[in-house]
Image (tube, grey):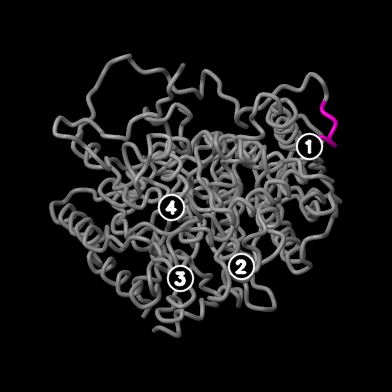
Amino acid sequence: MTPLWQYTALDIARLVRRGEVSAREVTQAVLEHIARVDGAPGRLLEPGQDPEAIHAAEPGVHAFITLTAERALAQADAVDAALARGEDPGPLAGVPFTVKDIFTVEGTPSTAGSRILAPFVAPYTATAVARLEAAGAIMLGKVNLDEFTFGSSNESSAFQPSPRNPWDLTRVPGGSSGGSAAAVAAYEGALSVGTDTAGSIRQPAAFCGVVGLKPTYGRVSRYGLIAFASSMDTPGPLTRTAADAALALRLMAGADPHDATAVTLPVPDYLAEIQKGVRGLRVGLSPDYFRITRVDPTTGEWHTEEVAAEIRAAVEAVAHTLADLGAEIVPDVPMPHTRYGIPAYFVISRVEAASNLHRYDGVKYGYRTPEPVVDLHDMYRKTRGQGFGLQPKLRILMGMYVSAAQYSERYYERALRVRTLIRRDFEAIFDPQGPYRLDALLAPTTPTPAFAVGAVYGDSVLMQYADQLTVAANHAGVPAISIPVGFDAQGLPLAAQFFAADFREDILLRLAHAFEQATHDAAWRQRRPPILSERA
Amino acid sequence: MADQITPELFAHLVRLAALELTPQEAEYLRRELNRQLEAIHLLEATPIPPETPITSHGVPYTRASRAPLRDDRWRPYRNREALLAQAPEIDAEGYVRVPDIPHEELE
């Protein structure tokens, strides 16, 4: 019999709403599963403490920073009580989920993975989370992330040990929503709410073999999302199935009086949309997404390399499957400004980060230096010096430099104009009167599968280039989804990505769902992360 | 190529950013900034048509999609105590206490 913690969100909601199982039973089962597989939670290290030693002593996925078990059981009891009274408990009744600790949830530590917010207990709940809870979902706790979402491996978190890839605990889960992706892959909850600024939902979803959806910018409210790059941050769901992502998005999306950038456009019934299949959809392939153009930071020379052969083969296999289902594959679609995505991101996101992080000063909330200080400015410097890790400091300093008046035309303004060119690449391919008239673009999500812990961290340029294939969607604002498509020779997940036009998440979900249904019986879909059988 | 961000410029940025760094942090950060600038220089290689406007966010906002402005009405926050409880130091009257600003003797 399948344990309750292995069910999808849709299946759990169905069982709970029909009274076949109680929300408390489901929550209890998931909490017991978490206790078996998660190992030591992330915590601030004392001087001299070694995260590797903690991982060795209490090994596991380490997805969590704060497990809110009592709160979750109380939520479950409330769902069961509503059912007993004959009330509708909501479309996600009893569904356990986790929240990336970049979101405020009232009454919980909301740390952003940083020492500077370690003492902060949020006085309000982010809209995206509140809407899922209002639909009956059960929040299990806050999961780990790169500090302030700055990173692509989760290694930069001040809360250590940082999450591991459930498919291979010596490898990273990706980032910055590493805890979210790892939790979903390890069945610690049926869904997680993450954020994507340069690929931070899609890249960890790819590394961990789960579905990760970056909605259109403005589709989901950012109220309660601790800000990194306000023009690029996008909340979205990570799940094990496309249908679960469809339901989660429908519940999270929509206008919000708390967020002026949340659009007022109606939210489609994505669960109904995904039944439409893919016959007749025009899906493009671009050579610009099968290569990485990268600078050697010491010599200044530019190199182009192809993505890993297994990844290319996996994406081409997706195209074949879609063609068999009646989609039209359109090759050789140009996306000429893809290579400028990371350089432009280095400029734009850092300016926004420097601005958004200026508020952390030890005055009204969060960490304040305990050391004696000479004056207020000394307090700011010591608080921020001690409270921020290296990655925030790096971004703040770059942001200061490229936005300085004497350089801004060369850097910030220029990057914003290059951003227009990146956006126009997408407008051209999706233009219904244009030469390609695509419904979606199919591409790899990442240039490689998950890398080893410690292999890349410290090289800030190489780390950022993990996002080269995802970041263009954040510049342009268009939606994109990463789906699992198989495994490589080492047993690591492989993924593919679809992009669509503004607010066409319905197309993304149709493609993801159709591929999932067509490969439902594939042998690779029977695999489970080794830690599950080791800890049964 | 000589470092674009010299130690002097770096120190200036650190002051602007209100940070205090250890020497090891400073060395690592200055090096990574200069390495990232190598990548950023690629932006200068791409020709940009002169009339290209900036894009401050990818998705255009229209009358149909833009949220309306709300009434300019003051509504007190529902849980003032939760906010004040976050402050590192509060005095008896509910003011947040901080060290004094720097002072400089002028001639």
Q: Nearer the viewer, residue A240 or B73?
A: B73
Is residue A172 found inside the magenta-colored segment of the image? Answer: no
The amino acid type, in three-letter code, at marker 1 is Leu
Q: Are marks 4 and 2 on the same chain?
A: yes
Q: Are marks 2 and 1 on the same chain?
A: no
Residue A28 appears left or right of A314: left
Residue holding disc 1: B43
Residue A209: name its quadrant.
bottom right
Name the N-terminal-most of marks 2 and 3: 3
Q: Residue A81 placed where, x, y %?
A: 15, 55
2 and 1 marks in contact (CB < 8 Å)? no
Residue at horizontal 31%, vertical 37%? A364
Residue holding disc 2: A519
Asked if A86 appears above or below A228 in the picture, the reply is below
Residue A158 appears left or right of B89: right
Number of other residues with Cα within 10 Å of mark 1, as a class: few under 14, some 14 to 19, many 20 or more: many
Task: Report the mark closest to the observer, 1 or 4.
Answer: 4
